[in-house]
Image (cartoon, grey):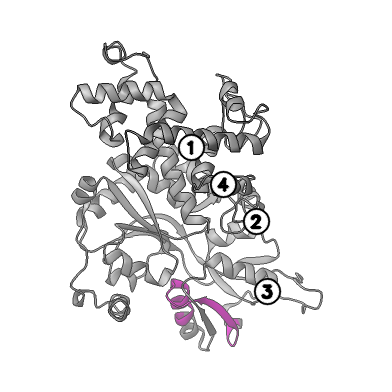
Amino acid sequence: MRRAVVCLCLVLAGCIDLYENISSVDIADIKKRGKLLALTSYGPNSYFLYKGQALGYEYELLSKLAEDIGVKLEIVVVRDADEITYMLNSGAGDIVAANIAVTKKRAQTVQFTEHLTLTRQVLVQRARGYKPKPDSKEWIPIRNTVDLIGKKVHVREGSSYYLRLKNLSEEIGGDIEIETVPGTEITEDLIKKVSTGEIDYTVADENTALINQAYYPGIDVETAISFPQRIAWIVRNRSPELLSTVNDWIKKMKTTDSYALIYNRYYRDPRLYRERVASEFFSTSGGRVSPFDAVFKKAAQQYKMDWTLLAAVAYQESRFDPNARSWSGAQGVMQLMQPTAVEFGAPNAFKPDDNILAGTKYLIYLDERWKKDISDPDERLRFVLASYNAGMAHVDDARKLASKYGKNENKWADNVELFILALSKPEFFNDPVVQYGYLRGEEPYNYVRQILERQEHYKKFVK
């Protein structure tokens, strides 16, 4: 623990060459690994969960970056923003995407990519006349930064806001009382405290301030305290090829309609943010994944399962819609075919509690059926999910093909999953070992991956 603290101090102080174990993982290593590790933080700019779906301006861009360089994206959530540089340099991640402004001090220890957006720092304070409490004093917003002399402003010490306030104190010739908060307290938390009257002032970048103002109409974000700044991602000094790759990608991406759609979704329509934050299914305020969390938890406890898996399956199947009905006749939250629903105890498949419990029982049934062939529970889960989507018969056909072509019939990744895909091709679905013919294999292939990825997102957000 002491060594970690010392190393962190060295990194933050810019003494990076004194630490001998800085990672040198670069783009070739990332492609070989097959995974891009992205360090980020919770918040509406970067990464959050809404109605069961992982979202965020930077998360969506990271997903496209990973897809374009041919690897998977793995999100590593940093709960203490003051540790993010240390974690990058020690190899816990390959890239930092956490709504960070480019500063000269930070650039001494890391490399910034091409900027994603431009913003400026603004003072977050209460709006004129707004009274969070009946006995609150009449509030007059500051418009001249000189009037910040003697005022208390709450920010994180390791943030660019702290540095800006220190410099602003010099510029205006008087002391601003800077109250620092722990790195675990995010900007959105401080903005909320301004709105409730718990604190008087904080600082945020303008994009963050504006989308929060959509939900907290009692705050004022008109007073700028900086010139425009660049928001960019960060990579290690020892990852030059990664930097080059990301820079080329950002330059190209920013010219596309896809980028414009992502940007507008988060920054041009404050109504959407207000709707998200007001929802109990917004991860950073409501803390719920779905309307049926309690039902998932009850069923999972009864059958000794992880409830986030049930939630991930339900989202994939119905987006938590209890009235969903597919073209094939599958019904309800867990999208059960009527015979399956009846067999496992849900004669009315549109009753959410019964449907979820029946879907849970069906998953347990599939797990028991595969247990005789596949002992490892993590490996077996992939076969269970594929069977839930496509049926055991088609999965067994894919296993037979895998065995015939020299692959491991009891391993999913890069083995049986390849032949699930192959079942859409005549030369494979007409093979003599195949009993049940054609399957649109891309659906179960993606189904398994997407559910497991979604479950990992849920685990990051729920307790």
Residue furthest front as drawn: 372
Reading the image, the residue beneath label 3 is: 141
Which of labels 2 and 3 is toward the front?
2
- Which residue is located at x 24 percent, y 53 percent? 242
Residue 406's tag is none
Instruction: Give the number of the disc on residue 364.
Output: 1
Q: Which image quadrant is residue 51 in?
A: top right
Q: Nearer the viewer, mark 1 or mark 3?
A: 1
- The residue at the point 60 percent across, 77 percent down is 144
Which of marks 4 and 2 precedes in the sequence? 2
Q: What amino acid type should be assigned to the residue bearing mark 3?
A: Pro
User: Hey, which quadrant is residue 431 in on the image?
Assistant: top left
Question: Which region is colored magenta?
Answer: 148-167
Which of the marked residues, 4 or 1, is nearer the chain's N terminus?
A: 4
Q: Nearer the viewer, residue 160 or 408?
A: 408
Residue 236 in percent (x, y) is at 26, 62
User: Of helix, strand and loop, which one carries label 1?
Assistant: helix
Sequence-first disc among 3 and 4: 3
Instruction: Give the CA separation, mark 2 to mark 4.
Output: 42 Å
Q: Of the residues tagged 2 and 4, which is closer to the observer?
A: 4
The residue that label 2 is drawn on is: 214
- Horizontal relation, residue 318 to residue 431: left or right: right
Q: What whole-number distance in Å separates the C-alpha atoms at marks 2 and 3?
A: 18 Å
**SS class, disc 3:** loop
Residue type at numbered disc 2: Ala
Above or below: residue 137 compared with residue 287: below
Q: Is residue 223 something that shows in the picture?
A: no
Residue at disc 2, secondary structure: loop
Give the residue at mark 4. 302
